[in-house]
Image (cartoon, rainbow, N blue to C red):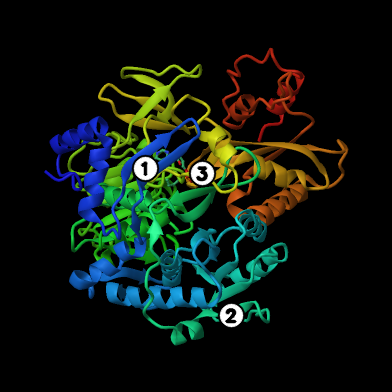
């Protein structure tokens, strides 16, 4: 029996028990047998959740790109590593072999070096889903630079905040991006962002849409000519196991986004291990994850996890509705995709469309379907299972987070019996538990509480960039000696977990994790606004949509409310991005507050959900009269 590849339920239980009984032997064996190390470790794990300080494979030396590329060259040099499927179906797909990937990553890495990037420097990447995106991550990793990818749907303000937070020296972007029938001026957005970033010395620009852009003399350089001149050999920088590999920002319940820092060795081992098991990847499979590399899903399960296994991974530039709602299924048929991994919001949108969009394509290559990002509702699950999987493909409902680096709770396909809406069982090495509000662990089954993890796993984030205190407070202070996830969950009679949603002030809209505070801060910048509060409400396609309660400075504000709504959404778009726009905006004279001045979001949530019949206890409110007004004017 191999620890690395779990093939049936009995093996799962055996491996799981071993991973809990003796985690160091378990993770030591997996690391030793499946990866390339330049120097072995002294200890597998040292940790202290109090501080918190977590160290995996201390003393080991490696380079993750040797593991993702070089070591495959002998046996898989001509195998396709990446299939690039462009936005426009008429543009030819590109098959990049492991040999070609090696060549391109080395050239790019040399260009980074020639432009002053050294080990430990931070590089901001703001690119569409084109091969250069995956290659730029790997090129940074090749030379030990820390990448910080910013999703190419974010605004100039969001980019500059992220660049300044971790002092990036360089930005890698493109002239623009294709998105369905539209183009987006990425370079223009970067130019705006850089007006408030002093540390950026170089901007490397990929030519993708051939638009007219301005190049700032001495700062901006076209990438292609530099690549053409660079050598295709670049010795990998030998890194310590705990050297940071990347920073990725995620929203929190207060203003500033959190730069989650992931380390090299533990992240590599865990993403590779979970990719192999959750997708049961076999040598000739074609695997497709539709996420953007700008999110953790893309980092772990488009780039690092698949490539560490020598897999073929599809990189899709387009959107599900272009040129029509059959695009996903056309791509599945064209590339004979075996594992398909997407988000509930996409599934719900696709399920609303005519059946012939999927029926006219041959989906028989599919073996496994995956979902991630938010709870999947039963209806969407059944549509996915019946219409796409033809009841033959197990659905892996994978629960995890930016902070966890890899999938934590998920069925192992063909082994774990699935139940709609349940993420089922923890993967080997993961020790989840449920806690009540006063800090007691809930034992037994048929309980619901707050989801925590009791023991470290290799790919957990090590800190928040520049703010270890916040790391401790957010994740390790709610419950002693535990990592707190921010999610609520229930455990059924067979020990399966069902994730019920966030218990903090984070709302998941179309799978995007949005903190309420930064959105409220943006709204409050409108000159007519004095205060605001955001809550989520159920939405057919997005899962949750945003409902804003806004207090105007002058109650007699004469401007048209619809114009104000547009202006507010415009500000949000500028500050955060269009994904954070509000679906509903209700103007009100006050917000329900506790005596300590905290907004009682529970009440606002109930009203937004049209469930105001039972508002619970409102006696502790400072201003109970406002509740009636809000109810009367609810949208
Ligand atoms: C939050 C993390 C992990 C990659 C995408 C999101 C929610 C994630 C599931 C799932 C129910 C899920 C949780 C989690 N979530 N997967 N299978 N079922 N909820 O990463 O942006 O860091 O968001 O997404 O609430 O805490 P993220």
Quarter occupied by the N terminus: top left
Residue 585 image position (x, y, % from top left): 69, 41
Ligand 1 positioned in quadrant: top left
- Based on the displayed image, in which of its 4 quarters is residue 577 positioned? bottom right
Seen from the viewer's position, the closer of residues 301 and 466 is 466
The yes-or-no answer for disc 1 within 8 Å of ligand 1 is no
Image coords of residue 536 (percent x, y): 57, 37
What kind of element bears circle 1? helix
Mark 3, residues whose alpha carbon is within 10 Å: few (<14), some, or many (≥20)? many
Residue at 46% across / 19% down in the picture? Answer: 436
Residue tagged by mark 2? 221
Q: Is residue 367 shown to the viewer in this render?
A: no
Q: Judging from the image, what secondary structure is the residue with disc 3 in?
A: strand
Residue on which the image places disc 3 = 463
User: Mark 1 — residue?
Assistant: 380
Above or below 184: residue 387: above
Q: Residue at x 27, y 49 (%)?
A: 273
Query: Can you see residue 409?
Result: yes
Q: Is residue 70 left or right of residue 267?
A: left
Q: Position of residue 328 (x, y in %)?
A: 36, 61
Element class at badge 2: strand
> Could you tell me how far apart the alpha carbons at marks 2 and 3 are, in whole angstroms?
33 Å
Q: Is residue 451 left or right of residue 198?
A: left
* Earlier sequence position, callout 2 versus callout 3: 2
């Amino acid at each position: 029996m191999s620890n690395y590849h779990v093939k049936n339920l009995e093996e799962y239980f055996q491996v799981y028990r071993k991973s809990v009984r003796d985690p160091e032997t378990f993770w030591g064996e997996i690391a030793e047998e499946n990866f390339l190390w330049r120097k072995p470790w002294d200890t597998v794990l040292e940790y202290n959740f109090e501080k918190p300080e977590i160290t995996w494979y201390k003393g080991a030396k490696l380079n993750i790109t040797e593991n993702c590329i070089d070591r495959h060259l002998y046996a898989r040099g001509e195998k396709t590593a990446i299939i690039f499927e462009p936005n426009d179906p008429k543009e030819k797909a590109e098959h990049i072999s492991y040999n070609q990937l090696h060549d391109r990553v080395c050239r790019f890495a040399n260009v980074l070096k020639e432009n002053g990037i050294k080990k430990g420097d931070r590089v901001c990447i703001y690119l569409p889903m084109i091969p250069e995106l995956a290659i730029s991550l790997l090129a940074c990793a090749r030379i030990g630079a820390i990448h910080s990818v910013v999703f190419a749907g974010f605004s100039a303000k969001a980019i500059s905040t992220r660049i300044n937070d971790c002092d990036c020296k360089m930005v890698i972007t493109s002239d623009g991006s294709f998105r369905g029938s539209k183009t987006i001026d990425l370079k223009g957005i970067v130019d705006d962002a850089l007006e408030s970033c002093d540390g950026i010395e170089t901007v490397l620009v990929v030519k993708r849409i051939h638009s007219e852009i301005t190049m700032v003399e001495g700062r901006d350089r076209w990438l292609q000519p530099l690549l053409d001149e660079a050598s295709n050999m670049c010795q990998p920088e030998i890194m310590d196991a705990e050297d940071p590999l990347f920073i990725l920002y995620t929203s929190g319940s207060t203003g500033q986004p959190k730069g989650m820092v992931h380390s090299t060795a533990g992240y590599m081992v865990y993403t590779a291990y979970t990719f192999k098991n959750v997708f049961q990847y076999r040598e000739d499979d074609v695997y497709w994850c539709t996420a953007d590399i700008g999110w953790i899903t893309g980092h772990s399960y488009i780039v690092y996890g698949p490539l560490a296994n020598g897999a073929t991974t599809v990189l899709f530039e387009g959107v599900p509705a272009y040129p029509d709602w059959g695009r996903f299924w056309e791509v599945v048929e064209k590339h004979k995709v075996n594992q398909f991994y997407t988000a509930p919001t996409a599934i719900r949108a696709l399920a609303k469309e005519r059946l012939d969009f999927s029926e006219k394509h041959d989906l028989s290559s599919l073996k496994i379907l995956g979902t991630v990002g938010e709870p999947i509702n039963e209806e969407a699950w059944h549509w996915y299972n019946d219409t796409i999987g033809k009841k033959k493909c197990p659905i892996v409902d994978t629960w995890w987070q930016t902070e966890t680096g890899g999938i934590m709770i998920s069925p192992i396909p063909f082994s774990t019996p699935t139940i709609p809406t349940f993420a089922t069982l923890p993967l080997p090495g993961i020790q989840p538990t449920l806690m009540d509000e006063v800090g007691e662990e809930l034992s037994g089954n048929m309980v619901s509480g707050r989801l925590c993890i009791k023991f470290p796993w290799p790919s957990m984030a090590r800190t928040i960039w520049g703010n270890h205190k916040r790391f401790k407070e957010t994740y390790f202070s709610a419950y002693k000696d535990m990592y707190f996830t921010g999610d609520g969950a229930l455990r059924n009679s067979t020990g399966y977990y069902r994730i019920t949603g966030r218990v903090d002030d984070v709302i998941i809209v179309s799978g995007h994790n949005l903190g309420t505070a930064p959105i409220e801060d943006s709204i409050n910048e409108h000159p007519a606004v004095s205060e605001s509060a955001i809550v989520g409400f159920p939405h057919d396609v997005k899962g949750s949509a945003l409902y804003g309660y806004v207090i105007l400075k002058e109650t007699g504000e004469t401007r048209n409310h619809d114009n104000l709504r547009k202006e507010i959404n415009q500000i949000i778009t500028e500050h955060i991005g269009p994904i954070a726009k509000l679906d509903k905006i209700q103007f009100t004279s006050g917000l329900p507050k506790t005596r300590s001045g905290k907004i009682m979001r529970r009440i606002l949530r109930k009203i937004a959900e049209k469930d105001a019949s039972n508002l619970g206890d409102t006696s502790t409110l400072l201003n109970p009269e406002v509740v009636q007004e809000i109810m009367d004017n609810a949208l």
